[in-house]
Image: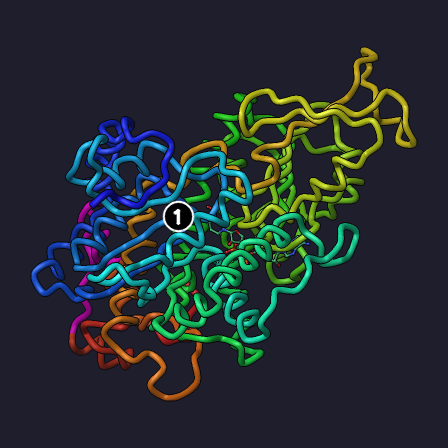
Amino acid sequence: MTLDHQVADLSLAVAGRHQIRLAEHEMPGLMALRAEYGPTQPLAGARIAGSLHMTVQTAVLIETLTALGAEVRWASCNIFSTQDEAAAAIAVGTGTPEDPQGVPVFAWKNETLPEYWWAASKIFDFTDENGQPIGPTMILDDGGDATLLVHRGVEFEAAGAVPPAPAEGDADYTAEYAVVLDTLRQSLATDPQRWTRIAASLRGVSEETTTGVHRLYQLAARDQLLFPAINVNDSVTKSKFDNRYGIRHSLPDGINRATDVLIGGKVAVVCGYGDVGKGAAEALRGQGARVIVTEIDPICALQAAMDGYQVATLDDVAGSGDIFITTTGNRDVIRARHMVAMKDKAIVGNIGHFDNEIDMAGLARVPGIERVEIKPQVHEWIFPEASETAQTTATEGGERRSIIVLSEGRLLNLGNATGHPSFVMSASFTNQVLAQIELYTTDVDADGEPGVHVLPKVLDEKVARLHLEALGVELTELSKDQAEYLDVDVAGPYKSEQYRY
Ligand code: NAI
């Protein structure tokens, strides 16, 4: 049978396979799960619809899920984040580029928005042994787009129609949402029960990131969550590692690959001082930048101050920064007025999940502004010579002033570089695999309505344990007396649920 797939170039599979092989060496958690669970196949019969950056590390995740028995279909959760060689290797699997035998994957770098939502929809197209459509048993999501499709699809199928997209200029208008509605309109026309059928087959979703988790809690609070969810992000071994140490690595990687600008000595403004912001600020300071943090939360603002950063408002520092990075998971953080006020050749990038942190539409509306592609995912926005903001439009040499925007305002570590390194993603993805096993083999909502759950602490500690040996960490063993004194088990868990690490 021909493999259902859409990738950039299957001939990249050999290069992808080499990278996957090296990544496996750096992903001890996932490899340990293959060794532990391979023989018992806990995911046999599971059908997993995955929507997560199609990188080399994700390839190791996918092949761990299949090694545990699952059938998998995959798309990326961002238009720029796919590594084409990884996608090719996953599609080819044990076959050849002429006869791919791997996992149906629908992902390539630089998708358009309609292509992105087409691919997101394709991950649900499982068929049974007679070729009839059959829904997935789980979603593995990053940012919640796959979960959103199912929820909106069910809503519109119940209503029998998809509403018109909000008009341009309306508060809730985004070009992307119009594409989502179009995607659902097409499916309603061809298969009016598609999403209802898919929702009915789902045992749940495991969600990777802060932004997706936020969407899940919103659905649960409104009693609209259609199936149980496991919040992988808030495993300590995910958010306190990937969001922080992963960013500490991949943010400078993205800035360097995009611009090659020396970070040392520059003024870098980091918007948000949560887990991602802490990693971003540390990385930039590590390169010798003078870092200024902006925050809305007094606790995080105080943490930033105690960590030695200046804390200011963006309005006050927009004109003095050289590099601006958003890490908030919030909308409209860097506005057009901030970008208009920036220094010549200031660099602007986002490392939060969605592109709405930076008002790209507002920037494009600055009268007379021009956009020049320096290279893919790096654009110079050149301000007009004279405008209402004339005092800031020209440089001293009389040239037109410009700013550099990375990845069109989308997450730059995956758009301009290759995302987090394997070792930290091993911790995140070990949590993902454990979450998928929990969803498939247990009733995570045994005591009520679909809810959002975190993995038990004992599994969080297991994930950490699986990564100690590779780093040569020698753990001190708790004695029985000490365990009794602390009122914990010798084998853990060692901390209460309230402990914040
Ligand atoms: P978090 O909730 O720990 O931190 C966000 C911080 O931003 C909070 O402290 C919040 O108070 C602050 N904030 C909100 N609005 C703000 C505003 N207008 N100005 C200044 N600060 C503001 O979230 P976390 O885990 O740090 O994640 C942040 C974003 O990064 C999310 O969208 C998440 O999904 C994404 N993410 C991206 C990754 C990547 O590889 N690019 C990896 C992990 C997470």
User: Would residue 199 be seen by someone viewing this image from the given angle?
Assistant: yes
Where are the magenta residues, as a range? 464-479
Relative depth, front residue between 19 and 184? 184
Kindly tell me whether mark 1's CB lies below 8 Å from ligand 1: no
Q: In terms of image quadrants, where is residue 366? A: top right
Per the image, is 147 magenta?
A: no
Say which of 289 and 443 sits in front: 443
Residue nearest the viewer, comparing 475 with 73: 73
Query: Could you tell me residue 109's position as x and y percent?
Result: 44, 34
Left/right of residue 43 with respect to residue 377 in the rendered view = left
Residue sitting nearer the eye, 325 or 83: 83
Residue 44 % position (x, y): 17, 64
Residue 61, compared with residue 435, is above or below; it is above
Q: Amino acid at mark 1?
A: Ala
User: What residue does disc 1 label?
Assistant: 75
Q: Is residue 57 above or below residue 404?
A: below
Q: Is residue 371 left or right of residue 240?
A: right
Which residue is farthest right? 388
Residue drawn at the location 36% of the way across and 55% of the way down: 50
Residue in the image at 49% along x and 56% along y? 143
- Describe residue 354's horizontal placement relative to residue 132 as left or right: right
Colour theme: rainbow
Please tell me in which quarter of the rendered image ligand 1 is found. bottom right
Q: Is residue 281 visible?
A: no
Q: Position of residue 155 (x, y in %)?
A: 55, 72
Magenta segment main secondary structure: loop
Task: Residue at 57%, 49% (x, y): give it.
Answer: 354
Q: Is residue 126 found left or right of 326 in the rendered image?
A: left
Badge count:
1
